[in-house]
Structures are given as C-alpha cells and as structure tokens.
Amino acid sequence: MKTAVNAHVTDTVADMLTRVRNANLARHSSVRARSTRMTRDIARVLCEEGFIESYEEVGEGIAAQVELFLKYKGQQRKPIIAGLKRISRPGLRVYTNHRELPRVLGGIGIAIISTSSGVMTDREARKRGIGGEVICYVY
C-alpha cells in the first residue's frame, strides 16, 4: 500500500492519529505516518499496550515513515482501537502533575504522556510519580 506523506504537516502526532483512525475505519492491515521521535514513541507505547500488532520504520532520512500494523478481533474484524483523541496540541499544550493524571474510561483506555523520562502511559507515569504533557487518549 502506497501512502503519500504530506510534507507540510506541522502536527505530526495529530496526523498520525488521524491516519490510524481512518485506517481502522477502512479495516486496513497497516498504515504509514511520518517518522519522528514522538510518532515512534507513540507507536512503541501502542504496541506495548496491545493496541497494535507491531510497527517498523520504513525508509531513512527525511522521507522515513513509521508503519503500524493494526489489530482486529473476531470474524467481523472489529478494531481493537475504538477511539483516539488528541489532547495537547501545538496551539494549546496540556500539562499535568502525577496526582492529576487522567484516567481514560475508568482505566480501560490509556493516556499517553510525554515525561522527562520519555513517553509512557498514565499508569506508568503514576507508578513512577512523574507528570508531563498529555499527548492523547487511546481506548
């Protein structure tokens, strides 16, 4: 599957989340997005938490992309990811301390947090006692 990656996208995280959301709706087996440190870290967290099958980096340099292999369940191929919501965005950053980290759907979903110790889930950040920027919710 060939995907054109727009060179003029300023918010690569929102672009990646939108691509995953659309690929899920269309029941694609994989989706590509521009590869940045943040998109690779988000892909790693999604893989560790079982929301995607796996991911890999394709290409190199400025044309590098991260390919995410999506996960479905059952005969109807119901997407594992029911929703993706961007929280902190370039125009409005959202930060929180470890006591006020959000719980997504009462712990069913995850919040992806960018901390001084790297990108991790809200559970991991709570366990380590660190806050940070709330990137997105996944459920």
Image (cartoon, rainbow, N blue to C red):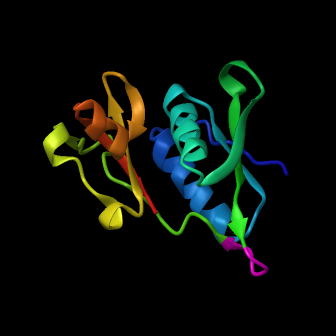
**Number of marks present in the image shown:** 0
Q: In this view, does 44 lie above or below 21?
A: above
Residue 9 visible in the picture: no
Task: Look at 74% across and 21% down and name the residue there.
Answer: 60
Quarter holding residue 105: bottom left
Task: Look at 36% across and 38% down and name the residue there.
Answer: 124
Q: What stretch is highlighted in magenta?
A: 74-78
State the image coordinates of residue 96 (x, y, percent, origin top left): 18, 41
Residue 45 shown in magenta = no
Magenta stretch, main secondary structure class: loop
| Left or right of residue 138: residue 104 | left
Q: Is residue 131 above or below residue 54?
A: above
Q: Residue furthest front?
A: 127
Residue 77 shown in magenta = yes
Foreground residue among 125 and 82: 125
State the image coordinates of residue 36 (x, y, percent, origin top left): 56, 28
